[in-house]
Image: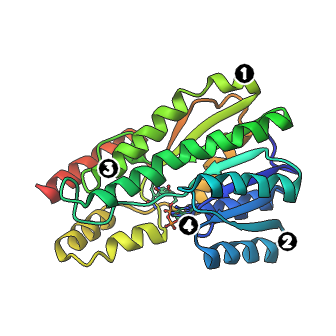
């Protein structure tokens, strides 16, 4: 699908990868709905899109609330007349201590935002896309959705869930002309990663610093470009697309795993 003249809805667009994707899709002449629980970040993204000559509107939505998710889709169709592209990108890591020591409410929240909310967003978006005769849905999983990720087992489990959901929904293309794909980024230079590095626990901070120093970080724009590729490529359906820096995904996955083992054991 060519994003030109289309309507895109992006969750977690108030920061990092979501913001970079909002800017790129607006550059390609899509109208963009910036959804985020963070109002100031979301409004800042809209200002940046508009300053670059694009079209965007902000809606405050907590993706863990069914009501907010329904309202976010309704806002999109009301503001721009329909929904063609949905990018379910909002996500969080689990605050320390690491599972199984993590508090139940902390790890449950990770599953809620990173997996259950993605399914809830898809469920709310499909009827709106059917009204348009089709669409493209993309989610942000992670390289941690394709490999073990020892610092945050719950995050990895949730992201594996997003990959499984994506791969199992390719039937929607035949049924409703909707393609469902996800991106699986390596480590990206966003506030999420900065928060890990700023961990109050000195041991966790040292581990995070060592891991981050061992590889170049991806730019959020690189992930946005992959999202654009998946939107444009009519043959992409049920795909979990790894995005890693200058090396094949398998190499990155192996080196991250080996690096983590050295650091954590
Ligand atoms: N940064 C990385 O290295 C990396 C790697 C792989 C995958 N990811 C994934 O990329 C996605 C975007 O992360 P980022 O790195 O840009 O981080 P980020 O923290 O910069 O952005 C995440 C955004 O999601 C929003 N958000 C969080 N909870 C929400 C909720 N309940 N409802 C609505 N919005 C909510 C936040 O307010 C924030 O604006 C996440 O799904 C993350 O898991 C990140």
Which quadrant is home to the N terminus?
Answer: top right
Residue at mark 3 to residue at mark 4: CA–CA distance:
21 Å
Mark closest to the chain's N terminus, 4 or 2:
4
Tell me which label, 1 or 3, sits earlier in the chain: 3
Residue at (47, 46) in percent of width and height: 115
Closer to the observer: label 2 or label 3? Answer: 3
The residue at which mark 4 appears reads as: 16
Residue, far left: 265
Pointer 3 or 4: first along the chain: 4
**SS type, badge 4:** helix
Number of numbered labels in the structure image = 4
The answer to whether 130 appears left or right of 214 in the picture is: right
Disc marking residue 175: 1
Q: Which residue is mark 2?
A: 53
Left or right placement of residue 13 versus residue 210 in this view = right
Residue furthest to the front = 67
Q: Is residue 75 at least partly visible in the picture?
A: yes
Query: At 71% across and 65% down in the image, what residue appears?
Result: 23
Separation (CA) of disc 1 from disc 2: 36 Å
| Picture layout, residue 149 above or below residue 190 | above
Contact check, label 1 and label 2, Cβ < 8 Å: no
What residue sits 34% from the left and 69% below the top? 196
Disc 1 and disc 3 in contact, CB within 8 angstroms:
no
Q: Give how far apart the Cα atoms at labels 4 and 2 are.
A: 20 Å
- The answer for how far apart the CA atoms under marks 1 and 3 are is 33 Å
């Amino acid at each position: 699908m060519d994003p030109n003249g289309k309507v895109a809805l992006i969750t977690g667009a108030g920061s990092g990868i979501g913001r970079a994707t909002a800017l790129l899709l607006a550059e390609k002449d899509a109208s963009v709905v910036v959804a985020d629980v963070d109002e100031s970040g979301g409004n800042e993204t809209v200002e940046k899109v508009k300053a670059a000559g694009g079209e965007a509107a902000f809606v405050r939505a907590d993706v863990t609330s069914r009501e907010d998710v329904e309202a976010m889709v309704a806002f999109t169709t009301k503001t721009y007349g329909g929904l063609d592209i949905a990018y379910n990108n909002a996500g969080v890591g689990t605050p320390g201590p690491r599972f199984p020591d993590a508090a139940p409410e902390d790890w449950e929240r990770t599953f809620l935002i990173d997996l259950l909310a993605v399914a809830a967003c898809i469920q709310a978006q499909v009827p709106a896309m059917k009204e348009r005769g089709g669409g493209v849905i993309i989610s942000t999983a992670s390289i941690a959705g394709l490999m073990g990720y020892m610092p945050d087992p719950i995050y990895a489990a949730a992201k594996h869930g997003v990959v499984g959901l994506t791969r199992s929904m390719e039937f929607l293309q035949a049924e409703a002309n909707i393609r469902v794909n996800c991106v699986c980024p390596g480590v990206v230079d966003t506030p999420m990663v900065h928060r890990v590095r700023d961990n109050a626990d000195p041991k966790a901070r040292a581990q995070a610093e060592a891991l981050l120093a061992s590889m170049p970080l991806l730019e959020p724009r690189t992930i946005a470009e992959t999202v654009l590729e998946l939107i444009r490529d009519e043959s992409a359906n049920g795909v979990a697309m790894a995005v890693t820096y200058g090396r094949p995904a398998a190499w990155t996955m192996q080196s991250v795993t080996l690096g983590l083992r050295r650091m954590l054991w």
